[in-house]
Image (tube, rainbow, N blue to C red):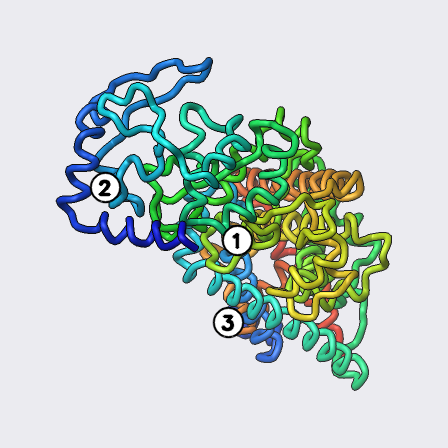
Amino acid sequence: MKKEKDTQVNEETQEVERFNVIFRIQHVIMFTTFLLLAFTGWGLKYAELKDVSSWWIRIWGGPKTAGIIHRTAGITMLLDFLFHVVYVGYLLLTGKMKIRKETTVIPLPKDVVDVIHNFLYFIGIAKTKPKFGRFSYAQKFDYWAVFWGMFIIGLSGLCLAFPVQASAFMPEWTTGWIWQLIAVMHSDEALLAIVFILFWHFYNEHLKPEVFPMSWVWLTGRISLKEMKHKHPLEYELMMKEKRE
Amino acid sequence: MVKRISIVLSLILLVPVFAYGEDIAGCIVCHNAMAGKIEYNGKVIDLNVDARRFEISVHGAFACTECHERFHENPHTPADNPVTPDVKKLSEEVAIKAKADPVALAACSKCHEDEYRDVLDSVHGRNVVKKGKADGALCLDCHGSAHYITKKNDKESPVNRWKVVETCGKCHGNEKLAKEYGIAKHVMNSYYESFHGKKYILGHKRAPTCVSCHGYHDIKSKDDPTSPVFGTNKIKTCGHCHKGANKKFVAAITHKDPGPIPHYAEKGLIILTMSVIAFTVLHVLLEAYSDIRDVLFRRRKEVEHEEGKGYSG
């Protein structure tokens, strides 16, 4: 009995590292630039609301300064993203990170099953929650949304920032409409990204009762064993199994 | 030359306040107090002149008869004072634009000779003098009444940087005129929705206005080979701001309708955005519901369940 209690206390306080400091810095750069981009881009997207938008842009130092902030933040974000890809590639190649179905961020068929399972739990049909690995489907969605955003918004943003250079790559038959398309892609997908972060990321990592006001993992990088067992049971089980071996 | 000298001399003579004060006083005493408008030759004209605004205008030091050359008597009937020959000739060409006094309309050329010549040779001026239509813009259509013209950088001036787009839009945003002259449809909107226009709205000091690309006094139709926006002329025009602009790049800057692709792409993206919002909002709401439900009705059960699971696993 006493022994059991000790294990429990241990689990309350004992923590494991979930994200190392390099990942944490990447995340801080990502969300800082994201906010800067959203704030400075918003005024331009809704320029037709002249009074509100020009007031808002003045807060950011006027249209010229806001433009410089937007471009600087955009390029920083792209570099941050590229670094992430290279860094993960390095971890995989050196074997410091292994692809396992319990710990990978790669979407698997199980994630689709988990979505359905979770919805069934929400409405009361399923009696238990799905058991997630290191990354739940919600977190995988969050993660890959960044790739989609980088591809669509980042590429179109580069074209808009360097129109003369970009036009060299555009086939002649596209010039009549491609720039409109790029502008639409950039601004509409940016809106999607903002709305997505606002609803999805903010609820899951900030507003949810169990994490409110925020999940501290982004700062400490650590997660308690208890929380891990609760939120990422498959990863926990794998870790325990490896420890025993 | 003689004309120039006479203008300069008369200007010098006009400078002393008392001289012009008396000269203008005879007219302004009535014309400052004329409420309402009258109909003259089928056109509604305003005979009133706001003396205060006139005084602070760039032309505030002029005698009325400097431009209204025909009028000399007070009261001015008949208006038959001899008119400077050049002004007389020009007044006949632009008569269709004048509401009441074509001589006054032509009199701008006495000082602004080069500008006037440019305007007459522009797409606006030719429409008046060659085609005899009243739609082409002359001096007053853009600069406002000659009585109240201020410096072009003055914030009241209709041709200042922050007002000139609106001023062009008086005609170019007019559907009837656009149709008659084959002006690209929604040309104003396509500007306001472009990055150029959006930056302009937000007050970007270097964002181009209509005149930055199209020119002003000597403005030409986009189909005129001398227009700065005709064909390869655009390379130079766009190059003012976009260093290294080439043929491929400048083709993209246009008021032309981009066709269906961006339109449907936008529709597709809106559907995608809406679906993602619908999914995330539904997910968040249902999850919040289940969290609340669990706290109220299932908490104890779940804790027991989890503990059991933890120990057995």
Q: Quadrant of residue B231?
A: bottom right
Which residue is under mark 2?
A: B55
The chain containing the residue under callout 2 comes to: B
The chain containing the residue under callout 1 comes to: B
- How far is mark 2 from mark 3, CA to CA? 68 Å
Which of these two is toward me, A11 or B239?
B239
- How far is mark 2 from mark 1, CA to CA? 36 Å
Which residue is under mark 3?
A: A219
SS at mark 2?
A: helix
**Against A10, is B286 above or below?**
above
Q: Position of residue B215 (x, y in %)?
A: 58, 51
Mark 3 Cα shell of 10 Å, populated few (<14), some (14-19), many (≥20): few
Left-right relation of A187 to B21: right
Tag in front: 2 or 3 = 2
Please name the residue shown 45% across and 17% down the image.
B43
Confirm whether residue A223 shows in the render: no
Quadrant where the C terminus of chain B sits is: bottom right
Contact between labelled residues 1 and 3, with CB atoms less than 8 Å apart: no
Extreme residue toward the bottom, this view: A94
Residue type for callout 1? Lys
Question: In the rendered structure, which disc, 2 or 1, sits on the residue that comes first in sequence?
Answer: 2
Q: Position of residue A13 (x, y in %)?
A: 50, 72
Which residue is under mark 1?
A: B199
Residue type for callout 3? Leu
Quadrant where the N terminus of chain B sits is: bottom left
The chain containing the residue under callout 3 comes to: A
**Against A200, is B29 above or below?**
above
